């Protein structure tokens, strides 16, 4: 085990413990949870909501949800950060879709999300399953990989993806479906 | 395992991935959600994809939250809820008890009004418009054992997946809590999928933003007309 892995394991164990204590309505634990995770979760809500004020309001809702729901988190079923990040992504998508406006242009100040396949980053990912998914994504054709990654990170639908990449809806569906089928084969393999 | 392909020719595992990624909208999303309810194998595939794709969160860049936000959140933990979403119901705790999986499946329209202006950007004709007459869905309970409910306003039918396990000599009862904040019984559930036909006035209560709740009651249902036993699952109704 590398030092990076050991650190990741320790961080995860600590976050698990903080989340469990939050579930027991421990305010100090909630504060620490916020300190440990708010930059990650704000990164998520900001990218999907597309503006700082909405991202802040959604993040507020996210932490209220976490405060009330932390007791339902089950260690072992989902990693703590995955559980928290999923709540943030879902809330942000709910917000975005409730606006009724399609988001098809990139955010002015949203950073590109690194494609770890190109460098050494894949090796730094903490978990085996992370590396496996990244490697399988890298095995896809570029437009398949781009579409799947964009759907995940921007929280957008087929129709929005098609507009964003200026291809017919049917073409986009075909790219994504072939990519997902290959991804499944790779992950199962 | 069900037939590997639907009538649209999309393999089951790919269809599950489409839903898990959030690619679908409108009727396609509704159809996929109905499939989750009807096919446990499909539901398991959706969950598999969700957990596999979740590792992408590792790559998500961080961004410092505004410094004042921590105090604002903490101030709202008790006392006056900061958002309409948690303050709207007489049972605020229940309204907030939506699970991560429900959040991922549902479009919460309760806080914001339905968009009434058409989208301003030009949209290719092949993109389906939102259907105001589409079905309503709620996922009750937690991610471990969600209970799905689907209401079709067109025919007034409410289908509920297998209800939660209850002790002997007890029965699960389904309630709707709408704008009045008062639980109204929709009927009794069993361990098998149940079809209910709510009365006219209760049909109107099953609207986006309403809460569905399941309580454990004596055989025959609550004797008082209000929940008397523990509430074991809740979920928010949303249009799909």
Image: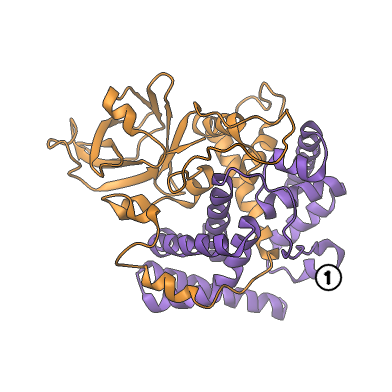
In the displayed structure, A94 sits above or below B206; it is below
User: Left of A15 or right of it: where is B142?
Assistant: left
In the rendered structure, the answer to whether residue A158 lies left or right of residue B193 reads: right
Find residue A62 and report its horizontal and vertical position in percent.
48, 61
Residue A19: x and y in percent read: 46, 69
Point out the residue furthest to the top here. Answer: B155
Residue nearer the viewer, B68 or A143: B68
Return the residue at label 1: A120
- In the image, which lettered chain appears purple? A
> Which of the two residues, B121 or B237, is positioned nearer the viewer here?
B121
Could you tell me which residue is drawn at 49 percent across and 40 percent down?
B114
Q: In this view, does A68 lie above or below A161?
A: below
Please name the residue shown 47% across and 78% down the image. A32
Relative to the observer, which residue lies in front, B165 or A120?
A120
Q: In this view, does A14 lie to the left or right of A156?
A: left
Q: Nearer the viewer, residue A75 or A36?
A: A36
Q: What element carries label 1?
A: loop
Whole-percent x, y for residue B228 in the image: 17, 44
Can see residue B111? yes
Q: Dot 1, how many residues are within 10 Å of its Cα: few (below 14), some (14-19), or many (20+)? A: few
| Chain that is orange in the image | B
The subunit carrying tag 1 is A
Q: Quarter of the image holding residue B153?
A: top left
Q: Where is residue B159 in the image (x, y as percent from the top left)?
A: 40, 27
Which residue is painted at 35% across and 45% down in the image?
B234
Q: Is residue B167 visible?
A: no
**A175 left or right of B112 in image:** right
Which image quarter is the N terminus of chain B in? top right
């Amino acid at each position: 085990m590398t030092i990076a892995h050991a650190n990741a394991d320790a961080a995860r164990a600590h976050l698990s413990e903080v989340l469990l204590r939050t579930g027991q309505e421990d305010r100090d634990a909630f504060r620490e949870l916020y300190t440990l995770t708010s930059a990650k979760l704000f990164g998520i809500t900001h990218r999907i909501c597309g503006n700082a004020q909405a991202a802040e309001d959604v993040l507020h809702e996210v932490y209220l949800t976490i405060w009330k729901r932390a007791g339902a988190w089950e260690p072992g079923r989902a990693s703590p950060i995955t559980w928290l990040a999923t709540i943030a992504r879902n809330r942000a998508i709910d917000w975005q879709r409730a606006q009724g406006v399609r988001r098809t242009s990139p955010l002015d100040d949203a950073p590109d999300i690194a494609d770890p396949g190109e460098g050494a980053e894949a090796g730094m990912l903490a978990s085996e399953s992370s590396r496996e998914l990244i490697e399988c994504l890298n095995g896809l054709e570029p437009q398949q990989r781009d579409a799947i990654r964009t759907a995940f990170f921007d929280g957008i639908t087929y129709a929005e993806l098609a507009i964003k990449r200026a291809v017919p809806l049917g073409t986009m569906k075909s790219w994504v479906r072939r990519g997902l089928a290959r991804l499944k084969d790779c992950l199962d393999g | 395992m069900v037939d590997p392909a639907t009538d649209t020719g999309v393999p089951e595992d790919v269809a599950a991935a489409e839903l898990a990624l959030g690619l679908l909208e409108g009727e396609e999303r509704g159809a996929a959600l109905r499939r989750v309810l009807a096919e446990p194998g499909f539901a398991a595939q959706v969950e598999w994809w969700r957990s596999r794709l979740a590792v992408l969160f590792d790559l998500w860049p961080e961004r410092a939250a505004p410094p004042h936000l921590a105090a604002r959140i903490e101030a709202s933990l008790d006392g006056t809820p900061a958002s309409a979403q948690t303050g709207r119901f007489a049972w605020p705790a229940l309204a907030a008890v939506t699970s991560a999986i429900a959040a991922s499946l549902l479009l919460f329209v309760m806080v914001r009004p339905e968009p009434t202006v058409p989208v301003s950007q030009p949209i290719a004709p092949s993109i389906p418009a939102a259907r105001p007459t589409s079905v309503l869905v709620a996922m009750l309970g937690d991610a471990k054992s969600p209970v799905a409910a689907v209401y079709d306003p067109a025919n007034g039918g409410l289908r509920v997946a297998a209800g939660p396990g209850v002790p002997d000599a007890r029965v699960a009862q389904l309630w709707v809590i709408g704008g009045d904040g008062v639980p109204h019984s929709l009927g009794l559930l069993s361990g098998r999928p149940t079809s209910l036909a709510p009365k006219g006035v209760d049909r109107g209560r099953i609207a986006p933003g309403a809460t569905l709740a399941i309580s454990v009651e004596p055989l025959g249902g609550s004797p008082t007309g209000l929940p008397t036993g523990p509430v074991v699952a809740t979920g928010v109704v949303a249009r799909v």
